[in-house]
Image (cartoon, coloured by chain):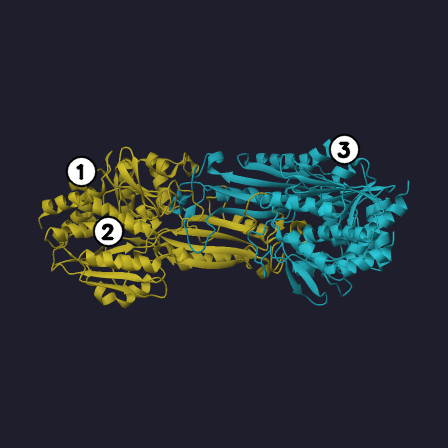
Chain colours: A cyan, B yellow
């Protein structure tokens, strides 16, 4: 393959490639709200075709469809490319430009960035990957590996129907030698990350209600003067929650849910020790606008806490009157949305069982537990060809890199790393963006200050494919 | 005054009188949201004029205006009529008809009821009172007492600017012999209540935020994977709240806020003992759709709990993602709206001081406390002419009645019962409605099953005025 010629096409086509990303952002696809999902699946399908896929299917599931593309490059090896086309909601967020406008903004030292829901998670990287394939095609070339592209529309919901798809298409997917999830893995200072896995997740709702408690108002919020003789489901939720952690909000008190701080495996311990030499906590502080970490931890202790502890988080809490000013009511129900991030060896089933047993033991068995998402952690060996192919790309670009045993976030990679496929699966790529799940989500387009722009990002994807072809040779 | 002739006009004008109430309900006047307030003040002013007031002022305050009418009947005595023209919000409520449609609905055994925000609290009673004055006028009569009518637009906000008005107009208001607040005080079974006072109230917001805590995200909600190393303001609010009550959500643990169950005064103890013989808890159960009271209390113990205990209520709680489905965020702040109902001898200042000291003592001094409403309790003697005038009206109507030492709800009657006015002040009247502050708020129009309709309600107001004139004679 004539890499310089593809590279020069990528550079020349930069404006088109930016517009592709903006087009993807402008089409809302908020899976939690079912907003724009069908339109987005159609758009992703047509982008796959335009990028050179010989076949593209919009595969129906019991939820949102999966877009499945095949690109036969006549190569020896095949990569399964995992993508998502859905995003998180924007409700409750204050943006400096409309979240589906995909505004181009100048930000030093990076030049232009694109701001919008999905910019980094993950319409920016998706668009960049498609654009890379376009450039290959325009150069009269074929990609160095065959591709099976799976773009799901429910990642932000915990990928509830991806397992059905993987099971149904296992024979075809098994043909892939490994799995790659294109990202933009540079941080604000340009350090690029390789994550060798992900935490698992359970996302659930707890609801206290008069109806299921048999105390308090059963049907509607009532005048708050009644608090003097009628019980309160809102207080009940507060006390059920408070029983689950220490007053620091960090120490988990649910027996069997927190295994404490898990010691890393020998391999992981080595990775963490090395990571501690390259990791810069100021990047995390800056990106999230925080000043201090839990217990004011630093260095390796901070990393171990992040990677090897279970979390119990309140994502949302609501009940009663939430509007302006005064409304004196005794709410008939109150709800908390929570997520639990699972470290290796924890299972979603075990965690949910522990939570229910805790509620039972503390006399809160009337509190409804509704499970939304649940899947386990995943891990890939650093020695696998796809992990090494990504590292090769980082080294070739001369970018300082960090190797993480796994990410704190969750991805349904267990579907690929576990049986029946049992493939190596990693995510990576140059480029930078941030504020996933938060307002003013962005991805860098021009680049600067050690951060690659869209051109470097696309070249890094191509480099991963080429490196993988070289390393995986059968 | 020719009572029968006024009565027959009231009966004949029933349709007009119902339309007056619907007109008042159809004009939204949600004080918390500032919705429709000016329009409502103008409408109330024109209703006062039409009802025979010789002068009507829309008096500006630092908040929503007060509508002040004077009706000089050439009588010996003057009553100050207190009213409110504002209502609670409807946000978060599910209604069976639009809340500002003022739908007429048939409900056995009562015939027609009007359903809408403000139907019982208090546009229904307000409209009924104006209609009664209309009928007096049409009969060529004058009311048996002179009236000073004060209609405020901020009762649901805790009447923050009514004190300024009372101070500024003290000389004129002092001319009143007593204060009457027209209500519809029959319960679902027809028992009619006389409340000799009200609990006080403090309404406030507690907010935990990364910004004021210096821990957790400072500016926006961030990706929830960060819970592993970043503190959570939502958990902080939960633990601050949990520290305030026992796990029952009822036992107050804020030192100096709960004086425990206060023993009633000797007069009140007699009233409660008598009340226990007439009080029917099933009415409360039915109106509020509840099955059980706190601690499964019954009889006099239940009444004492209701009347002589402080309440600490969560009116609303919110933070993070509150929409459909999944959104994995670590919220940067969380808020609780709370009200505290004050029993005799508690002061708003003392209660707020106790709450702040509690937060301080438990290490939560970063939690913001925003006071919205705050005013003390009020009490009027059963022997006062206005209380006896209301009882006379109840006896004349042959309706079983209950005498309550005070109501569980709050009204700014302290402004009239305390210095500089120091007047007796009570609320009362026949008629029934319910679901104040709740969806499907209603007031009965036709009547039945022991409950008076609009005609009986208006006649009871007229009866109160006449009885007062007879008893207060100077």
Tag 2 or tag 1, which sits nearer the N-term?
2
Q: CA distance from mark 3 to mark 2?
A: 83 Å
Between marks 1 and 3 in the image, the one whose residue lies nearer the viewer: 3
Residue tagged 1: B398
Horizontally, residue B209 falls left or right of residue B269, namely: right
Residue tagged 2: B381
Query: Which class describes the residues within 10 Å of circle 3: few (<14), some (14-19), or many (20+)?
Result: some
In this view of the protein, which residue sits in the foreground, A323 or B411?
A323
Query: Which class describes the residues within 10 Å of circle 1: few (<14), some (14-19), or many (20+)?
Result: few
- Residues at marks 1 and 2 on the same chain: yes
Report x, y in % for residue A165.
70, 35
Residue beneath the point at 52% across and 50% down: B318
Residue beneath the point at 26% across and 56% down: B82
Query: Which class describes the residues within 10 Å of circle 2: few (<14), some (14-19), or many (20+)?
Result: some
Horizontally, residue A70 falls left or right of residue B331, namely: right
Secondary element under disc 3, as helix, strand or loop, is helix
Q: CA distance from mark 1 to mark 3?
A: 82 Å
- Residues at marks 3 and 2 on the same chain: no
Q: Chain of mark 2?
A: B
Between marks 1 and 2 in the image, the one whose residue lies nearer the viewer: 1
Residue tagged 3: A170
Report x, y in % for residue B18.
24, 45
């Amino acid at each position: 393959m004539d890499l310089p010629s593809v590279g020069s096409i990528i550079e020349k086509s930069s404006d088109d490639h930016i517009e592709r990303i903006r087009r993807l952002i402008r089409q809302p696809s908020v899976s939690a709200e079912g907003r724009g999902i069908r339109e987005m699946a159609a758009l992703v399908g047509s982008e796959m075709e335009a990028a050179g896929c010989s076949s593209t299917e919009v595969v129906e599931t019991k939820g949102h469809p999966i877009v499945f593309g095949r690109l036969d490059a006549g190569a020896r090896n095949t990569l399964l490319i995992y993508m998502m086309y859905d995003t998180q909601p924007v409700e409750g967020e204050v943006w400096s430009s409309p979240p589906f406008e995909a505004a181009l903004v100048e930000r030093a030292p990076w030049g232009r960035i694109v701001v919008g829901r999905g910019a980094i998670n993950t319409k920016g990287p998706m668009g960049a990957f498609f654009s890379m394939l376009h450039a290959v095609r325009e150069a009269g070339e074929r990609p160095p590996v065959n591709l099976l592209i799976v773009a799901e529309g429910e990642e932000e919901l915990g990928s509830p129907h991806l397992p059905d798809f993987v099971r149904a298409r296992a024979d075809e997917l098994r043909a892939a030698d490994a799995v790659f999830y294109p990202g933009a893995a540079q941080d604000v200072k340009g350090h690029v990350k390789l994550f060798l896995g992900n935490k698992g997740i359970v996302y659930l709702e707890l609801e206290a209600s008069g109806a299921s408690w048999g105390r308090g108002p059963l049907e509607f919020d009532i005048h708050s003067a009644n608090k003097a003789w009628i019980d309160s489901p809102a207080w009940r939720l507060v006390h059920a929650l408070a029983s689950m952690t220490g007053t620091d909000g960090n120490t988990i008190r649910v027996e069997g849910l927190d295994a404490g701080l898990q010691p890393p495996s020998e391999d992981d311990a080595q990775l963490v020790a090395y990571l501690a030499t390259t990791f810069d906590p100021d990047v995390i502080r800056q990106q999230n606008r925080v000043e201090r970490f839990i217990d004011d931890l630093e260095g390796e202790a901070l990393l171990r806490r992040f990677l090897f502890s279970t979390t119990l988080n309140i994502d949302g809490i609501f009940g009663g009157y939430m509007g302006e000013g005064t409304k004196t009511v005794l709410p008939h129900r109150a709800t908390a949305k929570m997520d639990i991030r699972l470290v290796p060896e924890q299972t979603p089933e075990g965690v949910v069982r522990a939570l229910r047993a805790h509620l039972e033991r503390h006399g809160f068995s009337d509190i409804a537990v509704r499970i939304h998402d649940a899947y386990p952690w995943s891990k890939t060996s650093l020695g696998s060809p796809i992990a090494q192919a990504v590292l090769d790309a980082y080294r070739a670009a001369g970018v300082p890199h960090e190797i993480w045993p796994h990410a704190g976030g969750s991805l349904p990679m267990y579907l690929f790393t576990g049986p029946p496929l049992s493939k190596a699966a990693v995510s990576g790529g140059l480029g930078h963006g941030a504020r996933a799940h938060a307002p003013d989500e962005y991805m860098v387009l021009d680049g600067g200050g050690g951060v690659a722009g869209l051109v470097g990002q696309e070249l890094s994807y191509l480099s991963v494919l080429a490196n993988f072809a070289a390393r995986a040779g059968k």
